[in-house]
Amino acid sequence: MGCRRVQRAVFFWVDRDQEERIVERIARHLEECPQCRDRATEIERLILLVRSRCPRRAAPSRLQDQILSLLERQ
């Protein structure tokens, strides 16, 4: 897996909730590429900071309805 592809998919590695095969390929690349590893670590820190400071809340039902309506149109 090349650097460009890893940089686009690094969020899968951070969340680790995607297909295990993809996460493993990204992790292997990060072991070998210090530049990508540093970038992934920065992104992971940022995501963890945001998650710790911004609790998740459910979207208001009206917003959920609007989003579903828009998605159904496409």
Image (cartoon, rainbow, N blue to C red):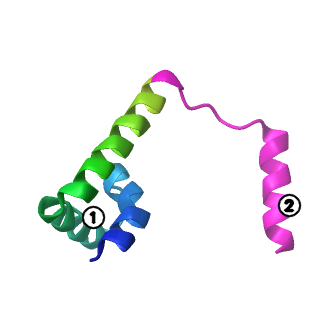
Taking the spot 20% from the left edge, 67% from the top edge, the residue there is 29
The main secondary structure of the magenta stretch is helix
**Residue under numbered circle 1:** 23
Taking the spot 77% from the left edge, 35% from the top edge, the residue there is 60
Screen quadrant of the C terminus = bottom right
> Relative to residue 26, is residue 65 drawn left or right?
right
Q: Is residue 60 above or below residue 71?
A: above
**Which is nearer the N-term, disc 2 or disc 1?**
1
Taking the spot 34% from the left edge, 67% from the top edge, the residue there is 6
Q: Quadrant of residue 36?
A: bottom left
Q: Quadrant of residue 44?
A: top left
The location of residue 4, given as percent across then percent down, is: 38, 71
Badge 1 marks a residue whose secondary structure is helix
Which residues are the magenta region? 53-74
Total label count?
A: 2
Nearest the viewer among 68 and 42 is 42
Taking the spot 46% from the left edge, 31% from the top edge, the residue there is 51
Nearest the viewer among 51 and 37 is 37
Q: Amino acid at mark 1?
A: Val
Screen quadrant of the N terminus = bottom left
The location of residue 55, given as percent across then percent down, is: 53, 26
Q: Is residue 21 above or below residue 23?
A: below
The location of residue 46, given as percent across then percent down, is: 41, 36
Circle 1 residues within 10 Å: few <14, some 14–19, many ≥20: many
> Relative to residue 25, is residue 61 drawn left or right?
right
**Residue under numbered circle 2:** 69
Q: Amino acid at mark 2?
A: Ser
